[in-house]
Image: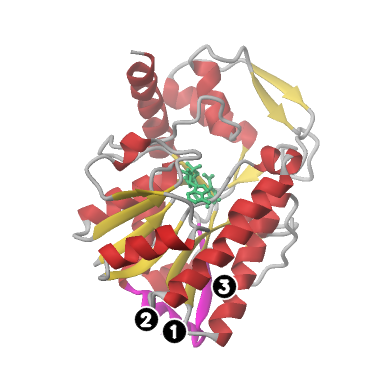
Amino acid sequence: MKVLITGGAGYIGSTIATALIEAGHAPVLLDSLVRGRREFASGLPLYVGDVGDPQTVRRVFSEHPDIACTVHCAALAVVGESVSDPISYYESNVTASLRFFETLLEVGRPSVIFSSSASVYAPNETFEVTEESPLAPASPYAWTKRMTEQMLTDVAAATALRAISLRYFNPVGADPTGRTGPYDPRPTHVLGRMLAVAQGDLPEFVITGTDLPTPDGTGIRDYLHVWDLARAHVAAVERFDAVLEAEGAPSAVLNLGTGSGVSVRELVDTFERVSGRPLPVREGAPRPGDAVGAYANVDKAQKLLGWRATSSLDDALRSAIEWAGRWRAATSA
Ligand SMILES: NC(=O)c1ccc[n+]([C@@H]2O[C@H](COP(=O)([O-])OP(=O)(O)OC[C@H]3O[C@@H](n4cnc5c(N)ncnc54)[C@H](O)[C@@H]3O)[C@@H](O)[C@H]2O)c1
């Protein structure tokens, strides 16, 4: 099947491209390169442009009329940046997405798998969230994800558009083929900052928030190997109609996580064990927009996609550490 991946030169989109190729599908990429890396699109058809530009999107579909569905990963995706620059986030993630969905309807290919986020959930006492759990986006970034989900629900109810929103928990690690992985030289995610410390780029790892309402006071996340996440997209592409049929609706929402919560302190311990070295750690204040955290109930994804995460946290961290070393060598050469 031919599949358009927006944001296909980014971390997750490029990994999805590899997983689709391995499963015998043919990805086509659309990316503005505002982030991402051109070399992550190497060997694949890449259109450089904005998803909100109808002319570019029309060109993609006129040159690839056999694209069956779109995985819509394109977005700005740094929580702290969304707090300081909300206009860019609403513009890129909401306004451009709406234009994009409109153009997909116009070209007659309105099947969308959308990269949403666990950041839409409200904190709860058990930390486990199902797709029905209360929502409370805590940052402009999280609001852009929630608003886009709602746009998809409303547009799907009124038009031929069909949509599956996948709420990613915390993707880590790299594509096992070594093709692509995390590339941000100033990562804000917790594991990226640990790797920066381990590589000597930061003096210490700061635990941002040690007094949170969690068992050990630090944030809870559900760290999912990006390869497991990418495989879930292959299942979503292949079972697109069956998922919506089972849902009995023109749109659906599914959690993608491992089903286990890990605190930041537990992540530090695992990182030290897997890397074989101690990590200098300091305790600090929470960052604006950061959530206390949650882990996914993944029953729905298991049932509808026939998918579950199979990698352990150790595997995911090993993959992240190995990739970070290779990426550093390649980009500093
Ligand atoms: N990485 C995570 O922890 C995480 C967690 C949950 C959800 N997500 C979502 O997954 C998706 C991919 O995230 P990522 O980590 O790969 O980020 P990324 O920044 O590596 O990839 C996003 C890509 O989208 C492109 N892009 C941004 N705006 C665009 C636009 N208007 N038109 C065309 N291209 C555009 C960028 O150039 C970049 O290559 C995003 O939608 C993000 O919100 C990511």
Q: Which mark is residue 281?
A: none
Q: Secondary structure at mark 3?
A: helix
Quadrant of the rendered image containing residue 20: bottom left
* Foreground of the two, 36 or 22: 36
- Residue 74 appears left or right of 261: left
- Distance (Cα) linking label 2 and label 1: 6 Å
Residue at mark 1: 246
* Mark 1: amino acid: Ala
Q: Secondary structure at mark 2?
A: helix
Quadrant of the rendered image containing residue 38: top left
Q: Earlier in the sequence, mark 2 or mark 3?
A: 3
- How packed mark 2 is, by other alpha carbons closer than 10 Å (few <14, some 14-19, many 20 or more), is few
Indicate whether residue 254 is drawn in magenta. yes
Q: Give the residue displayed 36% in from the left and 28% down from the top.
A: 323
What is the quadrant of the C terminus in the image?
top left
- Distance (Cα) linking label 2 and label 3: 18 Å
Residue at mark 2: 242
Q: Secondary structure at mark 1?
A: helix
Q: Position of residue 93 (x, y in %)?
A: 60, 55
Q: Nearer the viewer, mark 2 or mark 3?
A: 3
Q: Give the residue displayed 39% in from the left and 78% down from the top.
A: 108
* Foreground of the two, 243 or 112: 112
Q: Nearer the viewer, mark 3 or mark 1?
A: 3
Highlighted range, magenta: 239-256
The answer to whether marks 2 and 1 mark residues whose Cβ atoms lie closer than 8 Å is yes
Q: Position of residue 49 (x, y in %)?
A: 44, 50
- Distance (Cα) linking label 3 and label 1: 18 Å
Residue at mark 3: 152
Q: Earlier in the sequence, mark 3 or mark 1?
A: 3
The answer to whether marks 3 and 1 mark residues whose Cβ atoms lie closer than 8 Å is no
Disc 2 residue: CB within 8 Å of ligand 1: no
* Mark 3: amino acid: Leu
